[in-house]
Image (spheres, rainbow, N blue to C red):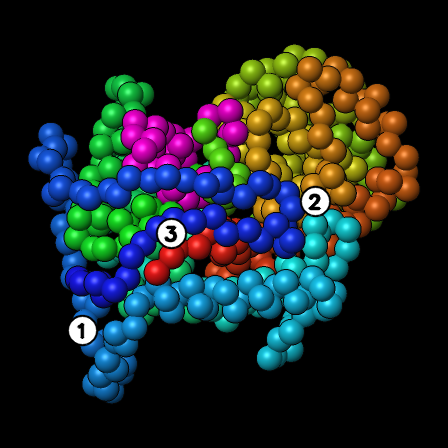
Amino acid sequence: MEVSASCSYTLLPFSIFLIFIVYSLLSKQNHLFLAFEPPPASTQNTSHLSAESVPSASSSVPAGNNTIIPIKKRCRLERIEADLAQARAAMHEAIQRRSFTSDKDEIFIPRGSMYRNAYAFQQSHIEMVKRFKIWAYREGERPLVHSGPLKHIYAIEGQFIDEIENGNSSFIAQHPDEAHVFFAPVSVQHIVEYVYRPITSYDRDRLVRTFKDYIMVVAHKYPYWNASKGADHFMLSCHDWAPDVSADDPELYKNFIRVLCNANTSEGFQPARDATLPEFNISPLSLTRRWFSKPPQNRSILAFFSGGRHGDIREVLINHWAGKDNEIQVNEYLPKGKDYARLMGDSKYCLCPSGFEVASPRLAESFHSGCVPVIISSNYSLPFNDVLDWTKFSVNIPVEKIPEIKKILQGIPEYEYLKMQKRVMKLRRHFQLNRPPKPFDALYMVLHSLWLRRLNIRLQH
């Protein structure tokens, strides 16, 4: 696939600090051009990396009814960056005017202090829906590529891959030259399930080599990775091991966007580049479960948690509180006859401690239950933090203050609790997983996180 020789590529920082002020933007980077050689032979079975053809830049694209639409020869990045510039301008105007512009009726208008800038978010979402296109590389074979888990704790990984792969999403580019970002649809969970089973070693070497083989194949075959040094490419995974795929070659992956549940800033997660994926525990029987949510004045439990001793934080929590206080109900195993969803719906605050890794599905479950989340974690970059101001609807308790949970929660005035609880209810839609997805729901919010990170860089053409 050829790219116009008149186009040169340099990664430059592009500031949209007026829009979202949470994170410092990508610092100026001096990158070496990554010219890949064909991937070396591997001792692992890499048959899943067999190539499928992608339309060449000079070819034509079928448009239905056997009509052929020729691809324009204008520099790809010139067109993409012009499109993004229009989106940035619209967002700046929305901030200045404190209003939004849309060519259709909006079904939801975000407002309130729980948004860092509601006008910017609204306009950004509008621009994303109108413009954002993703190209998923077609190389590779199932089950390691193009599919992922659709149930249980890592389900968001498979649900996203399936949404991108099923051909029904309006965000899918029809040709790679149309794409703002490029997706490496490799499932970390499926690599662990099919390559490591039975697990005899927790060494990450096979995972790292399998993922890197895939990146090397697409980088060698197409111009897009080298054009941006990987800055407009992304992976998405909810597995605990996912951050390790890029650990052995930081230069190769220094710009690569990682969308991860395990968003631990002490382990290399960079909020200005990477995006946090919320964790869901999805039943094999249904995408959604029935949740209960009592009115805030009728909730009889001050705080609730039920879960295993997964990690040091939960160990401290369970040792200190399990079975010792009726107002702070902490259970390693839920008592017989008790219903998890009903107990959350009867609680004012829901404790969300990290397990072996920082993420917990209890965060999303708190929103479904109308329960104010209490985050007990270290170094966790919270989901959608560039849009949502978590201080307005959650409580953060440091790990060392676990013995003081009751005192801290009882010290929150009732009117403050009621404001937080009301905001939790308003934000519930952002943590709802739908198939097909709906505007402003969890999958759209994940896409919006990617959209913002693409807006935050400019690729010079």
User: How many residues crowd around disc 1 within 10 Å: few (fewer than 14), some, or many (20 or more)?
Assistant: few
Residue 381 percent coordinates (x, y): 57, 35
130 up-or-down from 266: above or below:
below
Residue at 64%, 78% in the rendered image: 105
Q: Which corner quadrant of the image does residue 48 belong to?
A: top left
Quick one: label 1 or label 2, which is nearer the N terminus?
A: 1
User: How many residues crowd around disc 2 within 10 Å: few (fewer than 14), some, or many (20 or more)?
Assistant: some
Q: Amino acid at mark 2?
A: Asp
135 up-or-down from 104: above or below:
above
| Magenta residues (range) | 239-267
Q: Tag on residue 67? A: none
Foreground pick, 248 / 73:
73
Residue identified by numbered label 3: 232
Q: Quadrant of the C terminus?
A: bottom left
In space, the residues marked 3 and 1 are separated at their CA atoms by 23 Å
Tag 1, which secondary structure?
Answer: loop
Residue identified by numbered label 1: 59
Q: Amino acid at mark 3?
A: Asp
Q: Select label 2 or label 3 by which is in front.
A: 3
Residue identified by numbered label 2: 389
In space, the residues marked 1 and 2 are separated at their CA atoms by 46 Å
Membership of 331 in magenta stretch? no
Foreground pick, 304 / 20:
20
Residue at 11%, 36% in the rendered image: 40
Tag 2, which secondary structure?
Answer: loop
Residue 270 percent coordinates (x, y): 49, 35
Left or right of 187? Residue 317 is right
